[in-house]
Amino acid sequence: MPDRLSSPEVKTTLDAIRGALGRVIHGKSEVIELLLVGVLGGGHVLVEDVPGVGKTTLAKALARAFRATFTRVQFTPDLLPSDILGAQVLDPKEGRFSFQRGPVFTHVLLADEINRASPRTQSALLEAMSEAQATIDGTTHPLPSPFFVIATQNPVDYQGTYPLPEAQLDRFLLRIGVGYPQPEDELRMLFSRQRENPLDHVEAVAGVDELLAIQAAVRDVEVKESVAKYLLAIVAATRDHREIELGASPRGALALFRASQARALLGGRTFVSPDDVQSLAAPVLAHRLMLTTQARYGGTTSASVVEGIVTSVRVPT
Ligand SMILES: Nc1ncnc2c1ncn2[C@@H]1O[C@H](COP(=O)(O)OP(=O)(O)O)[C@@H](O)[C@H]1O
Ligand SMILES: [Mg+2]
């Protein structure tokens, strides 16, 4: 077992990152943990919530804390794939074409309201996300590493949107909801912003190289066969459930495995516990499922179906 797993520097860095994010967004430690599971697991996250709950602030603070480059793209119906990936542009002075990199060439990309862009533009981003490269006019360009996408969707305002199909949603390691702060946290927010913006005081606590090293350490986290079988039993139960039309794919199982490893490392452990799998099942699997029409009309959510599955599958001892 490589020592990088239990190295005190990793713990120090993770605590510092939590602290940095917790100072800009109050009362949202669970959201911060899930965001870090996404980053450490080397995945991408979909944040589904209404405007003004701190999504942009979190994304910017995360980039700053890891000394990472950051870009934000507002998705709109007229956005073209080249507006994200980049394009060959003619240099009038030189008289020849050169590649102009698009906003996707960054470490942290905030893709705001991803469901407002056309399916063609959405899939350009999703392809770049899953392949860590962008293909423009037949030429492939590698993206920076690490590359982390935080895509947002407003769950209330669906008018004029192009909902992402499950096959595309499957590319996101996790889906996270933020929610309103508790009254005492919202009160603290008012005064912490009275004279200044706490975001301006976020300091770098690590570099992107350190993040890459932590991502590598996540892969060393041990998963016992009994725990892996438990994970698969939960996944299998989504494929054989009366309220689910389409269950989780093997990609979903891999995602739950990796996310559980990241949560274990965040918890200071060198092994995955059934608790990691349980608490991540809904954030990792729910957005990949298609409920039956009947279940949807009955007001059931895929997250509650997954929670139900978790309570019904026997936990290994
Ligand atoms: N839980 C919270 N704690 C502290 N500040 C918050 C919280 N939620 C929202 N804010 C503040 O509200 C403002 C709007 O947040 P922003 O990140 O722009 O939201 P979004 O991107 O979700 O629309 C920012 O000043 C942000 O810091
Ligand atoms: Mg925003």
Image (spheres, rainbow, N blue to C red):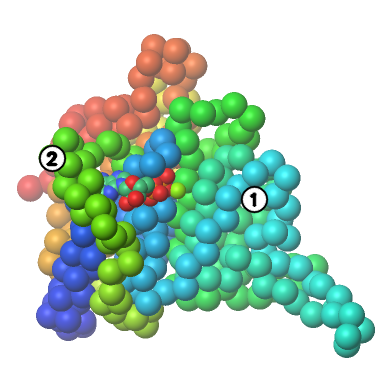
Name above or below for residue 297 compared with residue 306.
Answer: above
Amino acid type for the residue under numbered disc 2:
Glu
Mark 2 vs ligand 1: CB below 8 Å: no
Q: What number is the disc on residue 70?
A: none
For the point 16% across and 68% down, the residue is 15
Along the viewing direction, whichever of 139 and 317 lies nearer the viewer:
139
Q: Is residue 198 left or right of residue 107?
A: left
Name above or below for residue 17 compared with residue 240.
Answer: below
User: Image quadrant for the N terminus?
Assistant: bottom left
Residue 214, quarter of picture: bottom left
Crowd tier of the residue under label 1, counting other residues whose Cα lies within 10 Å: few below 14, some 14–19, many 20 or above: some
Q: Which residue position is annotated with label 1?
A: 123
In the picture as drawn, the residue positioned furthest to the bottom comes out as 94
Name above or below for residue 306 compared with residue 71.
Answer: above
Along the viewing direction, whichever of 290 and 283 lies nearer the viewer:
283
Q: Position of residue 248 (x, y in %)?
A: 42, 40
In the picture as drawn, the residue positioned furthest to the front comes out as 195
Residue 119, quarter of picture: top right
Q: Earlier in the sequence, mark 1 or mark 2?
A: 1
Crowd tier of the residue under label 2, counting other residues whose Cα lies within 10 Å: few below 14, some 14–19, many 20 or above: few
Q: What number is the disc on residue 184?
A: 2
Q: Is residue 94 left or right of residue 98?
A: right
For the point 57% across and 40% down, the residue is 115
Name above or below for residue 302 compared with residue 6.
Answer: above
Q: Position of residue 219 (x, y in %)?
A: 30, 70
